[in-house]
């Protein structure tokens, strides 16, 4: 279980995350929605241990910055940071060695095939198109097969085949009992099976709802998103004449 408790992150006077608390239950897929600048990347970077923050984040009860906690965590950043003079296969082997993986060759083959990079093995990082870089970024994040996977805007820049493949892969990970946390500002991109949605705006959590709560309310995720982030609710609009 991953617990985020009262996390606040300030950049000078700007508060990127303000007293954010939530829990990721094991084996669940949580979607983090919010407009640009809501604080989604900040909370993900805090969880993975890249940022200093106030509050606490624990993985199975252990501080997220300890080696013990970090071995459970995986991260796919929004923007790839590749080495221009390493090839695709060298990037994959670099990650395999960094994570001390054993018997990883078949997993590399599987990932490169699924994300259509198999014929690009010998291409250098700076020879890849933006979409291919994004796909390699995904493969690098998926290779260690962590128990808790954080994906920051993973669909950005992907072609339709890769989006479909990623959604299938996410569903397989979900069925294998992995815990996933996926941030996006594109509601349509998370039409896969999710268990919980957290909506952030202005650095704060504005809603944290289980799938059956939304389905039971008869609203779509989009309805809820606009209701929460823009105050657009049918009843509220019709009663707006009550305001002074
Ligand atoms: P999101 O991922 O939801 O688009 P971010 O977490 O990137 O939002 O940003 C939240 C807020 O923090 C924004 O106001 C953004 O400008 C600010 N911010 C993010 N990173 C930095 C940084 N390195 N320095 C200063 N402000 C930052």
Image (cartoon, helix red, strand yellow):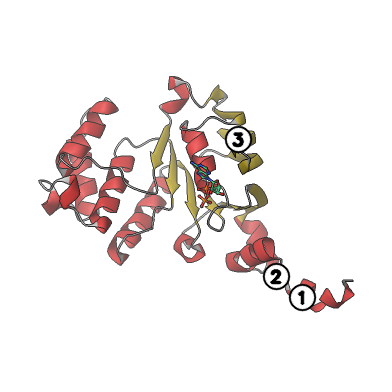
Tell me which label, 3 or 2, sits earlier in the chain.
3
- Residue 211 badge: none
Q: Where's the N terminus, which quadrant?
A: top right
Residue at horizontal 65 percent and vertical 61 percent from the top: 229
User: What is the tally of numbered marks visible in this picture?
Assistant: 3
Q: Position of residue 159 (x, y in %)?
A: 29, 64
Q: Position of residue 79 (x, y in %)?
A: 36, 48
Q: State whether residue 74 is above or below residue 198.
A: above
Residue 168 or residue 243, whichever sits in front: 243
Identify the residue position indicated by label 1 in the image: 237
Residue at horizontal 20 percent and vertical 31 percent from the top: 103
Whether residue 177 appears in this view of the structure is: no
Point out the frontmost of discs 3 and 2.
Answer: 2
**Residues under labels 3 and 1: Cα distance?**
35 Å
Cβ at disc 3 under 8 Å from ligand 1: no
SS state under label 2: loop
SS state under label 1: helix
Q: Quadrant of residue 74?
A: top left
**Residues under labels 2 and 1: Cα distance?**
7 Å
Q: Position of residue 167 (x, y in %)?
A: 38, 57
SS state under label 3: strand
Mark 2 touches mark 1? (CB < 8 Å): yes
Mark 1: few, some, or many residues within 10 Å (few <14, many ≥20)?
few
Residue 86 or residue 94, whichever sits in front: 86
Point out the frontmost of discs 3 and 1.
Answer: 1
Q: State whether residue 151 is above or below residue 211.
A: above
Identify the residue position indicated by label 2 in the image: 232
Q: State whether residue 95 is above or below residue 224.
A: above
- Residue 4 badge: 3
Residue at horizontal 46 percent and vertical 32 percent from the top: 50
């Amino acid at each position: 279980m991953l617990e985020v408790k009262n996390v606040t992150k300030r950049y000078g006077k700007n508060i990127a995350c303000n007293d954010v608390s939530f829990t990721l239950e094991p084996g669940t897929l949580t979607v983090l929605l919010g407009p640009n600048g809501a604080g989604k990347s900040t909370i993900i970077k805090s969880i993975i241990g890249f940022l200093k923050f106030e509050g606490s984040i624990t993985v199975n009860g252990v501080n997220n910055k300890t080696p013990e906690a970090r071995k459970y965590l995986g991260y796919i950043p929004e923007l790839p940071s590749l080495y221009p003079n390493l090839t695709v296969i060298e990037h994959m082997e670099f990650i395999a060695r960094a994570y001390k993986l054993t018997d990883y060759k078949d997993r590399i083959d599987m990932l490169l095939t699924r994300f259509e990079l198999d014929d690009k093995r010998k291409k250098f990082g700076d020879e890849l198109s933006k979409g291919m870089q994004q796909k390699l970024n995904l493969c690098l994040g998926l290779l260690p097969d962590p128990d808790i996977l954080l994906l920051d805007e993973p669909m950005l820049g992907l072609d339709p085949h890769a989006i479909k493949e990623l959604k299938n892969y996410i569903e397989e990970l979900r069925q294998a009992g992995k815990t996933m946390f996926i941030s996006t500002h594109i509601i349509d991109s998370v039409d896969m099976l999710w268990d919980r949605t957290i909506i952030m705006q202005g650095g704060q959590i504005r809603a944290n709802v289980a799938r059956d709560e939304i389905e039971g309310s008869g609203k779509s995720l989009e309805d809820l998103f606009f209701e929460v982030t823009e105050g657009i609710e049918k009843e509220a609009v019709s009663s707006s004449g009550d305001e002074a």
